[in-house]
Image (cartoon, rainbow, N blue to C red):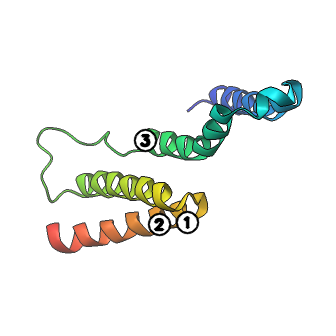
């Protein structure tokens, strides 16, 4: 990755963060109290976390000839399993931190299981 790409990405993230933090101060309070905005606010952290996880899935080294015993396939299956578990735990608990801890534990546990039993 080039350094100009990283600098541009950093500034883009900073601009998005600034706009999203400043926007509530510019929007009338009556609009901020609408039910749909509260629902959006509740689901936004999980949506961001899911997007980050989906963009980091390890599928680049997979091909049609990848076998069930390959480490790359084990990693992808563990990532997908952990993501599903995170979604389930968040749906039940509505606690982002608990979901993240479960996801970290799940990916490590699933990697261990796949390594032990599949290969």
Q: Nearer the viewer, mark 2 or mark 3?
A: 2
**Picture disc at residue 107:** none
The alpha-carbon separation of the residues under discs 1 and 2 comes to 6 Å
Q: Position of residue 91 (x, y in %)?
A: 47, 54
> Is 53 drawn above or below residue 114 in the view shown?
above
Q: Marks 1 and 2: CB-CB under 8 Å?
A: yes
According to the picture, the residue beneath numbered tag 1 turns out to be 98
- Label 1 sits on a secondary structure element that is helix
Question: Residue shown at 71%/30% (left/top)?
Answer: 7
According to the picture, the residue beneath numbered tag 3 turns out to be 54
Lower sequence index among marks 2 and 3: 3
- Label 3 sits on a secondary structure element that is helix
Q: In the depicted view, which residue is nearer to us: 36 or 85?
A: 36
Q: Position of residue 115 (x, y in %)?
A: 24, 69
Q: In the depicted view, which residue is nearer to us: 81 or 42?
A: 42
The alpha-carbon separation of the residues under discs 1 and 3 comes to 19 Å
Q: Position of residue 103 (x, y in %)?
A: 45, 62
Instruction: Classify residue 34 as left or right of residue 97.
Output: right
Question: Residue shown at 15%/67% (left/top)?
Answer: 118
């Amino acid at each position: 990755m080039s350094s100009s790409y990283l600098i541009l990405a950093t500034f883009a993230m900073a601009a998005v963060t600034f706009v999203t933090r400043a926007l509530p101060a510019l929007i009338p309070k009556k609009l901020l109290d609408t039910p749909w905005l509260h629902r959006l606010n509740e689901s936004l952290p999980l949506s961001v976390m899911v997007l980050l996880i989906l963009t980091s899935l390890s599928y680049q080294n997979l091909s049609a000839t990848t076998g069930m015993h390959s480490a790359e396939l084990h990693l992808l299956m563990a990532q997908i399993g952990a993501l599903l578990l995170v979604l389930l735990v968040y749906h039940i608990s509505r606690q982002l931190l608990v979901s993240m801890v479960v996801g970290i534990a799940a990916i490590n546990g699933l990697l261990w299981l796949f390594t032990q039993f599949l290969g």
